[in-house]
């Protein structure tokens, strides 16, 4: 599903964000990317959804080599990848419902399917009673649920999460983690970046540990 | 298929209108900038058109006066007149008798015509007033025509304000050159200002663009509503500018200029002709769209 072979990422200021990363994440995996701030977790996530290009090495997502991908192709690839961020990245001038519908409209879903899909996913994340609320009027946990709903409404094969629980209390974190587990059980591959090692070991034994842009640990994959 | 295309179009229009509603202030600034720029441009064009018209009018007054010898017979006058009108440069020639010339002089002196009473006889010569065809109303042709007219028998002298004409021609050339330079400069400044204003409006929505890219929107899909917004801004800006221009023109013409039209030339001041009105609207729309295109590029490189 996701393969990297000796991938490097150096930012224009010559700062090496990732150095010689190889990995292989299989379909249906729930993988944690762990490491302290600045370890390269966010860069790794960005490389997977084509927000950044690797400076060296090969990255293959769903059989597509990202080194040679065209912009229109990468847009299409992103439709099968859901992304959730620590800061939610919601459209704050749109309602909960509109934030989710927005994705379906952008990717050209049939009008008849839009309502049904949006309703189903908002029910799944437990926001079916807050459809007309504006994001900023909701709690952090609820906002993250909108972001998750938006990320999974199109049934992505990969769900990426960049510190999605970083701003949430422990109880909300547990709820959100249950949601991710639920999504993973439906067959979606989940890549979850966090600095919280305890959280990682609680939910999965597949970890990619990063430090200063390098992979540490002894895992084979 | 048709259903999907219609739905897409509906989506684009809805998004453009939603964005205008939500970002009222930035859109107002962008539309205001386009209005102001086109207004300046419109005023400039109207000025050039009217100056041209006034100059043409002044140009139409270029004529020659061929003075006839003393004591010429009617037959000789007729012959000279015919010879003159046969020249290719001449539109017509009108005979002004000694008496008529005297009357004209008397009329022009108005209250001071008493000074003419001391004259024992009419000192003014009879003359032929010669109008040139439009294409020959320039210093070079005029000089050549004068040379030919002078050679005709019974013509004693030919008068035509040469100095004035040469200065006038030079003046018009300079005005035209300055006009073209200012026009070009204005156009460039307008495009720059508008593209920067639109850049600001797009910058204020870079998060929205980022999210659209994130969920897999193609660049085309992201751009269309922005282009529509640019189009609407351009259209609104140009219509507003034309409206202000027309109202100002009406007020200006009625209250101010009509009193002075006698001094400026007989012609009335005109508004923009229809084709320029359409051109200005199209220019406004293009400004909106191109301003948008120029500014979009850097926000799409995710």
Image (spheres, helix red, strand yellow):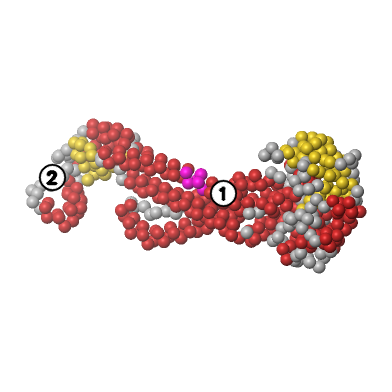
Q: Secondary structure at mark 2?
A: loop
Q: Is residue B64 magenta?
A: no
Q: Chain of mark 1?
A: B
Residue A130 in the image, given as x and y percentages of width and height: 79, 66
Q: Which region is colored magenta?
A: B185-191
Classify residue A137 as left or right of residue B105: right
Q: Which mark is residue B196?
A: 1
For discs 2 and 1, the disc positioned in front in the rendered view: 1
Vertically, is B238 above or below B139?
A: below
Do tags 2 and 1 sit on the same chain?
yes
Using the image, name the chain to which the residue with label 2 belongs. Answer: B
Residue A59 visible to an observer of this rendering: no
Task: From the image, tell me which residue sits under label 2.
Answer: B123
**Magenta residues, dominant SS class:** helix
In the rendered structure, find residue A34 and report the number of the disc placed on it.
Answer: none
Query: Is residue B73 visible in this depiction of the protein?
Result: yes
Label 2 to label 1: alpha-carbon separation: 72 Å
> Is B70 left or right of B27, judged from the image as shown?
left
Q: Earlier in the sequence, mark 2 or mark 1?
A: 2
């Amino acid at each position: 599903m996701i393969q990297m072979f000796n991938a490097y990422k150096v930012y224009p200021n010559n700062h090496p964000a990732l150095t010689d990363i190889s990995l292989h994440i299989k379909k249906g995996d729930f993988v944690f990317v762990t490491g302290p701030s600045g370890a390269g977790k966010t860069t790794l996530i960005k490389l997977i959804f084509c927000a950044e290009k690797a400076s060296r090495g090969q990255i293959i997502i769903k059989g597509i080599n990202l080194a040679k991908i065209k912009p229109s192709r990468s847009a299409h690839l992103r439709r099968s990848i859901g992304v959730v961020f620590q800061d939610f990245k919601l459209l704050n001038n749109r309602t909960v419902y509109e934030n989710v519908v927005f994705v379906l409209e952008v990717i050209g879903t049939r009008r008849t399917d839009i309502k049904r899909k949006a309703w189903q996913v908002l029910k799944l994340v437990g926001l079916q009673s807050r459809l007309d609320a504006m994001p900023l009027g909701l709690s952090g946990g609820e906002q993250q649920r909108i972001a998750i709903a938006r990320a999974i409404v199109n049934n992505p094969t990969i769900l990426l999460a960049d510190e999605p629980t970083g701003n949430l209390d422990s109880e909300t974190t547990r709820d959100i983690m249950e949601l991710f587990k639920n999504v993973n059980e439906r067959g979606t591959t989940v890549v979850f970046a966090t600095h919280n090692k305890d959280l990682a070991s609680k939910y999965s034994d597949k970890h990619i540990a990063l430090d200063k842009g390098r992979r540490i640990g002894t895992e084979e994959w | 298929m048709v259903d999907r295309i219609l739905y897409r179009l509906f989506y684009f229009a809805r998004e453009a209108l939603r964005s205008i509603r939500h970002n009222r202030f930035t859109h107002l600034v962008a539309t205001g900038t386009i209005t102001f720029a086109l207004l300046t441009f419109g005023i400039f064009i109207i000025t050039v058109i009217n100056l041209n018209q006034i100059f043409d009018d002044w140009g139409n007054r270029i004529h020659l006066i061929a003075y006839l010898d003393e004591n010429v017979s009617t037959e000789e006058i007729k012959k000279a007149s015919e010879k003159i009108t046969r020249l290719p440069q001449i539109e017509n020639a009108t005979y002004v008798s000694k008496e008529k010339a005297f009357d004209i002089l008397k009329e022009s002196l108005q209250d001071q015509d008493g000074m003419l009473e001391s004259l024992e006889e009419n000192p003014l010569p009879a003359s032929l007033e010669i109008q040139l065809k439009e294409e020959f109303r320039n210093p070079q042709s005029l000089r050549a025509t004068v040379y030919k007219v002078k050679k005709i028998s019974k013509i004693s002298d030919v008068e035509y304000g040469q100095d004035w004409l040469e200065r006038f021609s030079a003046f018009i050339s300079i005005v035209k050159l300055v006009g073209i330079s200012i026009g070009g400069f204005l156009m460039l400044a307008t495009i720059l200002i508008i593209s920067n204003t639109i850049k600001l409006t797009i910058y204020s929505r870079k998060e929205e663009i980022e999210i659209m890219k994130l969920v897999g929107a193609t660049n085309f899909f992201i751009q269309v509503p922005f282009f529509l917004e640019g189009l609407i801004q351009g259209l609104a800006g140009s219509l507003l500018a034309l409206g202000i221009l027309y109202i100002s023109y009406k007020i200006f013409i009625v209250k101010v200029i009509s009193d002075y039209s006698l001094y400026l030339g007989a012609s009335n001041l005109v508004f923009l002709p229809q084709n320029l009105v359409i051109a200005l609207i199209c220019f406004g729309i293009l400004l909106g769209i191109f301003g948008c295109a120029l500014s979009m590029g850097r926000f799409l490189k995710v």
